Image: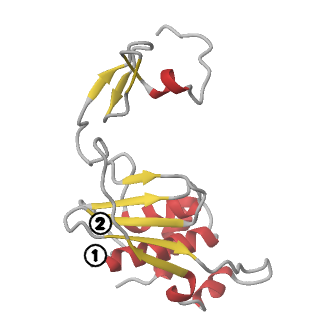
Amino acid sequence: MPIWQDYLDKANAYHGHICGGQILGIRMALLGLRLLGLEPQLQPQPDYRDLVIYLESDRCVADAAYVVTGVTIGRRRVKLHNYGKTAMSFLDLKSGQAYRISVTDHERPDKSQDLVAFWANKKDQDIFRVQKVNIQLKPGEEPGPPSKVALCQKCGDEVMDHRDVQVAGQTLCRACAEGSYYEALVEIKL
């Protein structure tokens, strides 16, 4: 069974550098797999068909989770709930088992310390809190093809997987109903 240091080159190639977030993320993902009884492999990346990972941050640990598991957002097996926390949950759809792992050790190496050596001296039980949790997928969160497709009556965009909302009898996308992250300036005709 590979140890976390075995993933450092792969993490560096994917993420662009090694940092504390990469090391913590690798270790969290390996621990999550072990808790679910899944055996990590370095090559080829495994396809954990029934594994869903919930990320609580969009920072470095997210890339590390991919490096270890190969689980991707595009295959609907990664859910982002950006609470700004260094935490992840691992759900096995087949068994229904789920575990949440969060960082409890807030000590970080200073710039003069070797990053890998610093984290190598710490045991998982000294860094992480593990909680057995219950996670229920909401309608439209399941991996696989869209469970519903609606048409926004304001902008005309398709809205998948129960993400549409009803406002005053109209089916709308959330961007039209609640405001979006972008401001449309002009439509470009192709």
Pick the residue in front: 187 or 175. Answer: 175
* Color encoding of the figure: secondary structure
Residue topped by disc 2: 46
Residue topped by disc 1: 38
Q: Is residue 24 left or right of residue 50?
A: right
Q: Is residue 52 left or right of residue 100?
A: left
Which residue of the protein is positioned furthest toward the front in this rendering? Answer: 168
Q: Is residue 74 above or below residue 66?
A: above
Instruction: Choose mark 1 or mark 2, whichever is in front.
Output: 1
In the drawing, what numbered circle is on residue 153? none
Q: Is residue 51 left or right of residue 107?
A: left
| Element at label 2 | loop
Q: Quadrant of the N terminus?
A: bottom left
Verify CB contact (< 8 Å) between mark 1 and mark 2: yes
Q: Is residue 9 above or below residue 139?
A: below
* Image x and y of residue 142, in percent: 27, 48
For badge 1, the amino acid type reads Leu
* Image x and y of residue 151, in percent: 33, 19
Q: Residues within 10 Å of mark 2 (few under 14, many from 20)?
A: some
Pick the residue in front: 62 or 89. Answer: 89
For badge 2, the amino acid type reads Pro
* Image x and y of residue 103, in percent: 57, 74
Q: Residues within 10 Å of mark 1 (few under 14, many from 20)?
A: some
Displayed quadrant of residue 83: bottom right
Residue at image coords 32%, 34%? 162
